[in-house]
Every structure is written in C-alpha cells, then in structure tokens.
Image (spheres, rainbow, N blue to C red):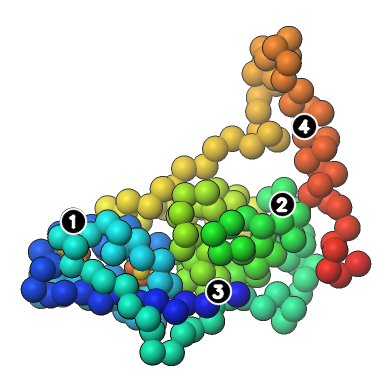
C-alpha cells in the first residue's frame, strides 16, 4: 500500500501550457484546459514528477488535507491465479518490483487480474512507478505480457516503455559467443528459476 500525502498545485499565472507535466505523469492525471495544466487529484499519486519537470516552476507539491491509501489487497483475490501469472512472467510473487514504493509482483499481478491493461492502470491502482518511474516499467510490462496484454506507449508520452531482454530470452548463439568469456547464462537461469519458484514466505 502507498500513502499519497502530497498533491500538486498549479500556479496558473506561471503555467504556459507546454504539456511537459502531461507527458511525464505516470497515471495520466494532468490535462491542459484553457491553455493551463489541470490536475485530476483523484488520479494523482503524488509522485512530484510534474513539479520536478515543469520548466516554468509553475507547480508546487503541498500536503493533501486527507491522505489517500492506494494499493491492491491480494488477500481478497485468488492467490493461485496471482502466483501462476507471476511464475509465467518469471517473478516470485513476493519479489519487490518497485523499490521506490515497495510494490511486489503479486500486487501488480492482482491489479492485472482486476482489469489493469497498461502500466498507467497499474500505477493508478498500486502506486507503483511513482518514484524513479524507470526501473519498474519492465516488470510491469513482463507481467502484462504474461497476461497476454501488449500495451502501446501513450501518444506523445515521455514515459519509458523499454523492455530489456531477460536471461531466459538470450538466443543460443549469443550464449555460445560469450561462453568462453566467463558468462554462465544457463547456470544463471537455473538459479533464477529456483528463486522464482521458491516457497512463499507469507503463505506456506
Ligand atoms: S509543465 Fe508547467 S508550464 Fe508546462 S503545462 Fe505543466 S504546469 Fe504548465
Ligand atoms: S501523479 Fe505525479 S506527475 Fe501525475 S499529477 Fe500527480 S504528482 Fe504530478
């Protein structure tokens, strides 16, 4: 669970309507209305990315009058389905996939089972990707892929949608090419598979 206790306030006198905040928001909470930025505070997850990127210094983060708790309670869901999705994406369900917010793979899988179709949906439901916004895009994309979902990047968005190759996807000819240089891809995969399928700490 993430506690959202900050919110952005736009100084309409300084805002030039440049859309930078629209493009960087991980939950698509900002739009331009009447040539100034307007934030949907029900969607905002308080990451301060808009404040940090605004070239006009037109946004200030202030305390929310009433903080909001955000998260998916996996105990209310079918944990076997969550586990299967995590294993398919090659994550241990209890593995932390967003270090900024401490969000685990099982919570992302839970969000997907509840209908999340994009990284923005996952961020909105869990609070994940409201820190650095870089590292956790990959696990989210892997878990969405495992559920058969292949989201397109937001048009004009500046969020990173890269997905790097995992140990399991390295082609055989690449493994062989580097075999003599001290790389042990197959052994790495064996260890990683053991980690992914290890018993659950909290439930077994
Ligand atoms: S980034 Fe700043 S100047 Fe640009 S639209 Fe947003 S609030 Fe306005
Ligand atoms: S989620 Fe972050 S980038 Fe989006 S409006 Fe809220 S503070 Fe700004």
Neighbor class of circle 4 (other Cα within 10 Å; few <14, some 14-19, many 20+) is few
Q: Which circle's residue, 1 or 3, is located before the other in the chain?
A: 3
- Dot 1 beta carbon under 8 Å from ligand 1: yes
The numbered disc on residue 91 is 2
Residue 12 lies in quadrant: bottom left
Specify the quarter for ligand 1. bottom left
Percent position (x, y) of residue 99? Answer: 59, 56
**Residue behind mark 4:** 188
SS state under label 1: loop
**Residue behind mark 1:** 55
Neighbor class of circle 3 (other Cα within 10 Å; few <14, some 14-19, many 20+) is some
User: How far apart, in angstroms, are the residues tagged by discs 3 and 4?
Assistant: 33 Å
Which residue corresponds to the image point at 40% horizontal and 62% vertical from the top-left? 26
**Residue 154, relative to residue 66: is it above or below?**
above
**Residue behind mark 3:** 2
Q: Which circle's residue, 3 or 2, is located before the other in the chain?
A: 3
Observer-side mark, 3 or 2, equals 3
User: How far apart, in angstroms, are the residues tagged by discs 4 and 1?
Assistant: 44 Å
> How many dots with numbers?
4
Which residue corresponds to the image point at 86% horizontal and 70% vertical from the top-left? 203
Q: Which circle's residue, 4 or 1, is located before the other in the chain?
A: 1
Residue 192 lies in quadrant: top right
Which residue corresponds to the image point at 81% horizontal and 47% vertical from the top-left? 195
């Amino acid at each position: 669970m993430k506690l959202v206790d900050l919110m952005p306030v736009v100084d309409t006198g300084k805002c030039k309507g440049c859309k930078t905040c629209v493009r960087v928001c991980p939950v698509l909470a900002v739009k331009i209305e009447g040539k100034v930025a307007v934030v949907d505070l029900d969607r905002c997850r308080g990451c301060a990315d808009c404040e940090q990127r605004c070239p006009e210094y037109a946004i200030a983060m202030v305390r929310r009058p009433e903080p909001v708790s955000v998260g998916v309670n996996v105990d209310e869901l079918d944990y076997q389905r969550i586990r299967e999705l995590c294993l398919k994406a090659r994550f241990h369900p209890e593995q932390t996939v967003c270090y900024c917010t401490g969000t685990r793979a099982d919570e992302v899988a839970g969000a997907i089972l509840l209908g999340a179709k994009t990284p923005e949906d996952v961020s909105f439901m869990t609070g994940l990707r409201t820190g650095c916004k870089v590292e956790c895009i990959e696990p989210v994309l892997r878990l969405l892929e495992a559920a058969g979902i292949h989201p397109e990047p937001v048009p004009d968005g500046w969020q990173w949608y890269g997905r790097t190759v995992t140990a399991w996807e390295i082609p055989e000819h690449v493994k062989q090419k580097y075999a003599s240089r001290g790389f042990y891809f197959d052994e790495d995969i064996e260890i990683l598979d053991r980690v992914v399928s290890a018993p659950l700490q909290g439930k077994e």
